[in-house]
Structure formats: C-alpha cells, structure tokens
Image: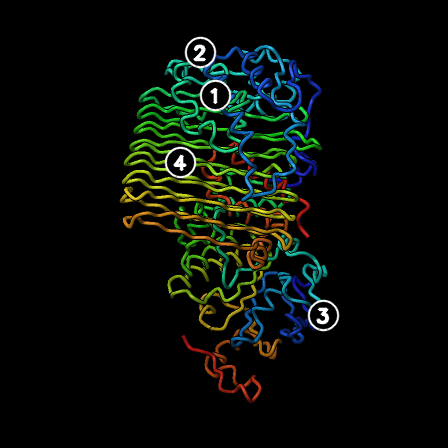
Amino acid sequence: MDNTNLKNEFSTTYKYGFSDDLKPVFSSPKGLNEQVVTSISKLKGEPDWMLKRRLEGFRSFVNKPLPNWGPDLSKIDFDQMSYYNKPSENQFSSWEEVPQKMKNTFEKLGIPEAERKFLAGVSSQYDSEVIYHSLKKQLEEKGVIFLDMDSGLRDYESIVKKYFGTVVPANDNKFASLNTACWSGGSFVYVPEGVSVDIPIQAYFRINAKNSGQFERTLIIADKNSFVHYVEGCSAPIYSTDSLHAAVVEIIALSGSRVRYTTIQNWSNDVYNLVTKRSKAYSNSTVEWIDGNIGSKVTQKYPCIMLMESGARGEVISVALAGKGQHQDAGAKIYHLATNTSSSIISKSISLDGGKTTYRGLVNVLPNATNVKSNVECDALILDDISSSDTIPYMNIANEDVSMSHEASVSKLDDEKLFYLQSRGFSEQQARQMLVQGFIEPFTKNLPMEYAVELNRLVELEMEGSVG
Amino acid sequence: MHPLLEIKNLKASIDSKPILTGVDLTVNQGEIHAIMGPNGSGKSTLSRVIMGDPKYKIDEGEIYFKGQLINDIPVDARAKLGLFLSFQYPMEIPGVSLSNFLRTAYNSTRPKEQALSVFKFDELLKEKLSILNMSQDFASRYLNDGFSGGEKKRCEIAQMAVLNPILSILDETDSGLDVDALKVVAEGAYTLSKSTNMSLLLITHYQRILRYIKPDFVHVFIGGKIVKSAREELAFELENKGYAQYMPKTNSKLKLTQV
C-alpha cells in the first residue's frame, strides 16, 4: 500500500468527519418521557402492541441504574438528547430519487462504488431513518426479506411480533431498554428455509444530527438450513458534544442455519457506543459475530450467543482499537444451554496514544450441557507506555464433561521484528503498521475484501502521528 | 571511484558495553568477503551496525556505503541504498504473507515506475522460490511463521534474490542447515553474486560454507575487530589451526569447531 498517497488522502483529522447541513424534517424535543415515546410510535403509525413494548422499555430504562462495573458513563446527559430524527418523509426505491446532498455524503463514504461492486442491497441509515434501500432481484426471487425495521414491522407484522424482543427483552439492560423505548431504523432480515444468500447483505449507519441518539433495532431470522451474511459498517461525523449509540441486534438462527454478522464500528471519538447484540442458535445451527471496534469514545459491546439446542455452534471474533481518549470495553458471551455445543472466542485488542482496551468475556456452561467444547483466545497489543489493557475472562462451568481452553497474551511491538522489517526497506511507521495488521489478520481475513482493505487503512490512519 | 563499503575505525557499544573496538574494512563492488571468528567476537554485531540496528550506538568511526556516510541514516534508507542483511535468526511475522510482505518491500525500495503488480510480482517470487527448492506455497504462508530453521534461512536468500541488493551481509546463514540445504542456499547466493555483481559479506563461524562460496578475502575477527586479513587460503589455515593463534592467551583453548 502506498503510504504517501494515503497520507494525502486522509488528513490527520477524522476521516469521515464531515457533515452536511441537511435539516431533519422532524426532531423530537430533547429528553425522554412517556409522551415522547408515545409520539414516536404514533408518528410511525405502529400497532398498539409495539407501543406497549416501547413503554415497557421506557419504564425499565428509568428504573435501571447505570451499569457501574465498566467504563464511566456518568457524563451521558439523557435530558440533552433528542430521541427521534427523521430526515425526509420518504424512502427512495432508486438511486436517482436520493437527494444530491445525501448522495454527496454517501460519495465521501464510498458507498455507490461499493454497491456496484459488492452489495446485494443497500440500507443506509441517515439520522434515525433508513432513507435509501435497494434490494437486488435475486434476493426477492429467493423470498429473502431485507427491509428497514420500520417497514418490516409494517409489512411483516406477524413475523416481527413473533420474534421481536425474544432474544433481547424490553427489560434486559438499561440501554437495551432505552432502545426498546425509542428504536428507529435498523434492519429486518428474514431468510426462508433452505435459502442461501451468496453475497453479503450490507447496511451503513451514520449519526448526522447533533446530539441525536441512534437506536437502531435489527432483527435477523434465518429459517431452517438457510445461510446469510449481514455486514454493518458505521461511520460518523465529528461533533464536540457527546452522542449516544445504543443499538440492539437480535438474531434467531433456526435449526441447521448459519448466520454471520459482521460489524466495523467507526464512530467519531465523541460517541458512547453501548450496544446489545445477542443471538439464539438452535440445533446444528451456527452463529458468528465478526466485530470490529475502532471508533467511539466508549464502547461496551459483548456479542452474545445462546446455544439453545444440541449441535449449535457459536463463534465471536473481535478486534478493538483504542486511541487517545478512547475506552474499548468489548468481548463476548457464550451460553452453553444444551449438550454437544461448541464455541470459540478470538479477541484481539490494540491500545495506543493513551487508549484503553478491556476484554470482558463470559463462557457459561449449564449443568445439563454435556460434551461441550469451548476455546477462548484473547491477545492484547499495547503500542506505548501511556496505553493500557485489561483482560477479564469469566468462566462458569457447571459440569465436568467440558473441554475448555483459554489463552491470553499481552505484548508490545517487538524491536527485533521492527528492525527485521525495516531492514527490508519499510519505514518505522510502515513496519509498525505491518506488525499491527498481521496481529489483527485472524480478524481481517474474515471480512469481505473491501472491508479488510478499509480496516487496514483505518488502522494506518489511527497509527499515524503515534510514532516517536 | 569509491569502494562500495568502507568502514573506518568503527567502534560501537550496546548499553555502554563496547563490542566493536575499531573495525577497518573495505569491500569493492562484486567482491566476496568472509568474516570468520569465534562465538562472542562481535561479528554479528558488525553486521547489525552496518544495517543500522538502533540497539547499538556508534561511538567512533565511519561507515561509508557507495561513498555516502551512513552512520546516522535510518535502517530502511540503507535498504533503499542496496544493503541487505540475511538474519541469523529471521523473525516470525504472523498474519503477514511472504508475498504481500516482499512485494511491499520490493516496491518501496524502487522508483514508482518499476513497481510490480501483484501478478507480476508473484511470478518473480515463485521463480526465486524454485531456485531455492522452496515450494510455491511459501508465497502465501505467513512470513517465517512455523518455518523450520532451514526454511527460514532459505527464505532469507529468496528475499535477497527478489530484492536484488548491491551488498548482502549473510549473518551465520550456514548455521542450522543440513548439508543439502547449505548447498542450495550457498550456491543460490553465490550464483546471484556472480550474475549481478553483488558483493557478499559472509559472517561465519565455520569454514564449510566457503566450499560453495569462494571468497576473495578472508578476515579473522576477534575481540571486536579484524586481526588478520588475507586471500582465501586463510580460511583453510583456520580450519586446520583454529583461532587460537590470534586469541589472547586466556582464551587459547578456543578452536574452530569442525563440522
């Protein structure tokens, strides 16, 4: 990769730190109460059961204290946020209908080209609403549903009602409750029995209104023996005041299916990213979370897999990169609830410029879950003396018929390796970047190619100026 | 015309401990020099100081390469001038494929217009791998990761063949190789030297690599400096008599180990 070009291409400031002056059509007043929750639901014309669900979430949100076991969240001012923004009245079924101003924003994010080359469908969230949505014909022909969540609720209410909140209940945790109360946007995916979606389904999310909370709600149902790979990439402009991103993702993998969910999170460094991702994997199904966290001020995210029935398999592969002022508190949770289930967690973290990473993971094996296999590997790389990393692995193993392995390492960049690479003509910075890219390769190799390239570029960008 | 490499009264230390105590050495284009000495004599340090390892501090003296004083220039700048070091213990770099690594190195040590595409480069790499009897699978394997000792050494020479330097320092390239691998590696380096007029600086404890690479000069390296230089016959004398005659009395038991 040509670094000189890259340096010119990216300034030292945040790569996607631009915003346009598009005014949201509707913005709810600041702060949250039952009235605001009710008006969000009414405005969307939702069925009563969803309003009830939202109010249930709201009450739980109010009653639950802030979690106190992780990063400091006390600076979040819930009263200063607006909880619903709608940038324009309509969705667009074709690219031509999308306003030029929004197109410009997508252009900077590289979406149009990405779509031409790789996308099966695009669902780009602009503020709190999906504004642009396309779905290739072959998906429709296969009966795959890929909609924004609001449209999913409108067009496929019975499916949504059957599964919504069954993996992450309204009273699950403070931020999942908040999401339940005021969710907007996100994706609804249903893959029919026996259908395999060959190309990754992709969605882009973006915060674009000052102080706007983002509460996407994504629900993915993979019917028996189906396969789908869902890719979510995030990018946000810089604002000086803190923003909150509290998404919920629920995945239901029915027997024999396989779901892979890939995220590259790159919020600007003033965002609290507090996400609940959870899945239920039924007999002989596989769920894979591929989770990359680069941006945000604070991230708390522990993708979870509940192995419900025999033969279910779960895998979480994650990368966290924490730079100046960032704390990435991420990991994974696996519940072995049935016999013959297996799981694997691979976590890689990098801290630099005073950043902090925490691996926080849980493997829980129930008493009746015999013949269980689990493998946990977490590696932390610390690039300088002012950065730090913690590893907090929990294991609750309630029976003896379990094969469990756990490896953890903390390392610095090896001077001898740097010298070796430099002796071949790499500058010190290139050598450092190459070692870091090699370190996260077990993650990167699982990404669609353009994401792998973008991730490596983002890592290079983060590391610029951190040398010497 | 400058000598290719000219080292004058070079003194270097690590953590204030002196290792090189006044090295003088001149290598001209196309020449092959062998530096032979017992363990701990500082010969590996010499190779690292020439390449610019920041662990070592130059206390005195000069290193000129192609007439340019390189004492203070970064490691990668030396590589770009055409210096190459084959490591005694090549590092394992998991996650970085040999082909990706070496293509980036190749392109960054050359002007833009000579940069090779992925496809063209892979052709080049595969050709060089086959010269060293290495399977083409190595191109996509992580650099040195899980390679045997011999594979690592062969990989070093394959890298050298691809990067095509002007002066290569082979630091104990012969150690850890069986006879067949030694022959492949040494002949590979020798052929490249002769066909491209590349100079070689062989750092070795043993004489056996000199069966395949005929040096123009042999230097005996003891106590951080060259104590005797001569044409190649010296190597055979060393094989027979050992280093003892050049050593301080207290170390007189040390002999050149026979292989």
Alpha carbon separation for disc pair 3 and 1 = 79 Å
Dot placed on the residue nearer the N-terminal end, 4 or 1 = 1
Q: Quick one: SS at disc 4?
A: strand
Q: Which mark is residue A305?
A: 4
Please tell me which residue lies in front, A156 or A41. A41
Colouring scheme applied when the structure was drawn: rainbow
- Marks 4 and 3 on same chain: no
Q: Which mark is residue A155?
A: 2
Disc 4: CA contacts within 10 A as few (<14), some (14-19) or many (>=20): many
Q: Quadrant of residue A236?
A: top right
Which numbered disc covers residue B61? 3
Q: In the image, are marks 3 and 1 on the same chain?
A: no
Residue that badge 1 annotates? A53
What amino acid is at disc 4? Ile
Q: Nearer the viewer's eye, disc 4 or disc 1? A: 1
Distance of label 2 from label 4 (alpha carbons): 28 Å
The residue at 60%/30% (across/down) is A235
Q: Report x, y in % for residue A204.
A: 55, 25
Vertical relation: B3 (above or below) B123: below
Q: Are marks 1 and 2 on the same chain?
A: yes
Q: Is mark 2 in CB contact (under 8 Å) with mark 4?
A: no
Whether discs 4 and 1 lie on one chain: the answer is yes
Dot 1: chain letter = A
Quarter of the image holding residue A35?
top right
Residue B109 visible in the snapshot: no
Question: Residue A94's spot in the image, x, y percent?
Answer: 54, 11
